[in-house]
Image (cartoon, rainbow, N blue to C red):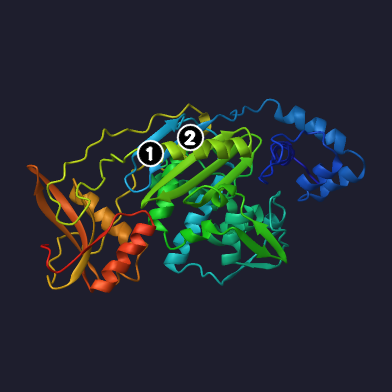
Amino acid sequence: MNVTGQTVRSLLLAFAWSGRETEGEQATERLANGRSTLRSAFSITPFVRGLCGRGLCGALAVLAVSVLAPLPALAAKYAAIVVDARTGEVLHEENADTLTYPASLTKMMTLYLTFDALDEGRLRLDQALPVSAWAEAQSPTKLGLRAGKTLRVEQAILGLVTKSANDASVVLAEALGGSEAKFAEMMTRKARELGMRNTVFRNSNGLPNMQQVTTARDFSILSRAMLSDHSRYYPYFSRRAFVYGGRSLNNHNRLMSRYEGMDGIKTGYTVASGFNLAASAVRDGRRLVAVVLGGKSAASRDARMEAILDKAFDKPSRGSEAPVVARAGDEDAPRATAKGRPSAKPETIAQLASTVSTPAAVRPPARARDEDADTKVDGSKWGVQVGAFSTREASKRALSQATKQAPFLLRAAKPAVTPVKANGATVYRARMVGLDEGTARKVCSELTRSGHRCVPVSPNEKL
């Protein structure tokens, strides 16, 4: 068998940087932990298994040190950010633009693209996907899939959000991209579309790769996008357990069982990244997303997440796109303003500039139905108001998000953006109209549970 230096280097890299995501696990695995660890890390190659069988695992460990020693690495650094999910206002940040490794937070983008495919009809939840040898060979944590078998799409989704299964992630990647490498390119392109300017993906699951980097700010952007673009699938992230192969697999995010209002999103861990968590919680109709990267342990990471969320929930939102009018007809409310904060430039890393060919782009605003013109409607019908905003585009985005959050209830409604005067300034009321009273109240109940503001509008109130 012809084994090149690059082959050995790639295999040893996967071993030496490996890290399980199981909560409570020690933060470091040493290279000389024994031949059983090496056999697991190199199960993909009969060549390496043969060497271990001849008692040469110790020599491979020494080789790992010598081969990997010259490779630069980013040290795990603490970073955090808390953002109002609806307005995008940053309520807390620390090292939010420092480059680090995403670990299994990577799977959030794999799931985002999977949900895209489901919405577009390219995948079905009950569709059986083939398991390749490459998927089977992934390091733990995993479901233990076998090449030649199949995995249903919904099983793969649940495997990612609960067990953080690396093999299931590759199954989805290969189904959507043809290969994991091509899927990683799709992931990076989508990151640019969403505004994640400092993120590069090289695989679908977050297993160690020095070119796969991100920032806390970028993953707060992805968290908000998941909530606004794929709200119908977001409840998957709240699953506490998933039964597969006769085993009950518990969700790694243990804060969901003790932090008021938390209902997702994803944990992550490798030795290089430290303990990561992207989370979302809603209290009193207000939803926040938060990201903590580089925790020294699962316990300290969770404690820090609780602390920054508690502090942020005590702050009133002042986002530039926050509703100026909280209640229908209250045109005299003061206009809310906030200073914009451009994303800071990341710490330099050669791979970020040299390996991404897709130009950075600002995510285009979501489109509400019939958004090119204000809609005239029958005034005898009920409606719902989701806010009044300082710009027309902000009102249209709010209507688009509301439609995605309650698509069934709002299927027959029409968007209406109406300019009104408030304290000498123009604000734009955002309403969905053409409903009966019962449906209007159900819509507001659904939107409020999801962290959106909403009030029913009766036919007696002026449009």
Q: Give amino acid for label 1.
A: Asp
Q: Is residue 116 visible in the rendered structure shown here?
A: yes
Q: Residue at 37% across / 53% down in the picture?
A: 451
**Location of residue 295 by image quarter:** top right
Q: Residue 357 has which mark?
A: none
**Location of residue 271 by image quarter:** top right
Q: Residue furthest left?
A: 424
Q: Is residue 53 above or below residue 227?
A: above
Residue situated in front as seen by the camera: 116 or 453: 453
Q: CA distance from mark 1 to mark 2?
A: 17 Å
Location of mark 2 (residue): 80
Q: Is residue 177 above or below residue 52?
A: below
Q: Position of residue 260 (x, y in %)?
A: 48, 49
Using residue 157 as the reference point, say whether residue 361 is left or right of it. Answer: left
The quadrant of the image that shows the C terminus is bottom left
How many numbered marks, from 0 up? 2
Q: Position of residue 413 (x, y in %)?
A: 24, 70
> What element does badge 1 sit on?
loop
Q: Is residue 169 visible in the rendered structure shown here?
A: no
Q: Residue at 62% across / 39% down in the picture?
A: 298
Q: Are marks 1 and 2 in contact (CB under 8 Å)?
A: no
Q: Residue at 63% across / 44% down in the picture?
A: 207
Mark 1 vs 2, N-terminal side:
2
Q: Residue 314 has which mark?
A: 1
